[in-house]
Amino acid sequence: MPSQLTGRLGFSAITGLAAIGFAVTIVSANLILVPGGLPLTGADIGRAEAFFATENGIVAVASALTPAAWLLATLFGAGAVTALRRSERDRGEAWSLIGFTGLALQNATFAAVTATRLAMSSATADDIPAPSGLWPLHDALFTLNGTFLALALIGLSIAGLRAGLIRRWHGATGLASATLLFTSATLTPLIIDHEGPLGLLGLVGWLLWVVWILAYGTTLIRLNRSSSVVETGLSG
């Protein structure tokens, strides 16, 4: 059954669906945490500790989604590299590999973010005072992760544009998101110092990142259909 499914869909379609699944998963996790009261980046340590002490169930549910998100992100990256590498090799370029590296690094960084949240939740739930530096560490990792998101966006956007795989608006969305996220990461010391409008840079950049992922996933699914049509025509 698995071999029949993969044969019917093709690798490109599977990784395109993974991209869409990744976007849905990270949005779902945020829809659990944000309405539940997750403090904004730069919030007071006391407010953060109060949230993790009272809402440890919400943190646990949202954190349970993250391993799937990392798996799906890796599948998406592999699919994008597979679709782009042939034309890149002909040009002597490696933009897609830069993008995949960004995805891998953001997976690792967000694993640290999730681990920090779980540590705070577990400590406060057991009436153990969480180290006062955990929340600032969480905020710093969360904001600096914009660097690796920007790397993924730049690499896969440029590779997609150069190969003619993605449309101009899609590439422009990726580069705009990368600019906002990298700017946010650069301003990390100011953003984590206190709540303020600078945090909106990362928020808008993240929303564009989700749109970009969904569009890339759709592109990979369509690429699979185009390949299937060509193969059918050749076999006929």
Image: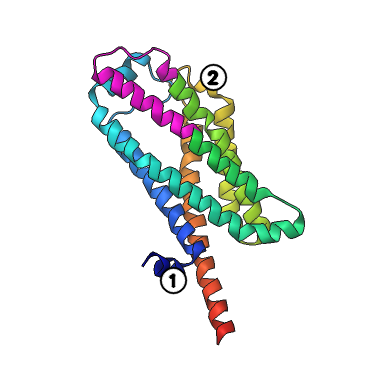
**Residue under circle 2?**
189
User: How packed is label 1: few (under 14 Cα within 10 Å), some, or many (20 or more)?
Assistant: few
Q: Position of residue 49 (x, y in %)?
A: 31, 18
- Most foreground residue, 140 or 77: 77
- Most foreground residue, 197 or 194: 194
Name the quadrant of the N terminus: bottom left
Residue 84 vertical position relative to residue 197 in the rendered view, above or below: below
Q: Position of residue 43 (x, y in %)?
A: 39, 20
- Most foreground residue, 12 or 28: 12
Q: Amino acid at mark 1?
A: Arg
Which residue corresponds to the image point at 57% horizontal and 55% vertical from the top-left? 80
Q: What segment is highlighted magenta in the picture? A: 109-136
Q: Are marks 2 and 1 in contact (CB under 8 Å)?
A: no
User: How packed is label 2: few (under 14 Cα within 10 Å), some, or many (20 or more)?
Assistant: some
Q: Amino acid at mark 2?
A: Pro
Q: Which mark is residue 8?
A: 1
Between circles 2 and 1, the one closer to the viewer is 1
Q: Please, what is the dominant secondary structure of the magenta stretch?
A: helix
Residue 94 vertical position relative to residue 135 in the rendered view, above or below: below
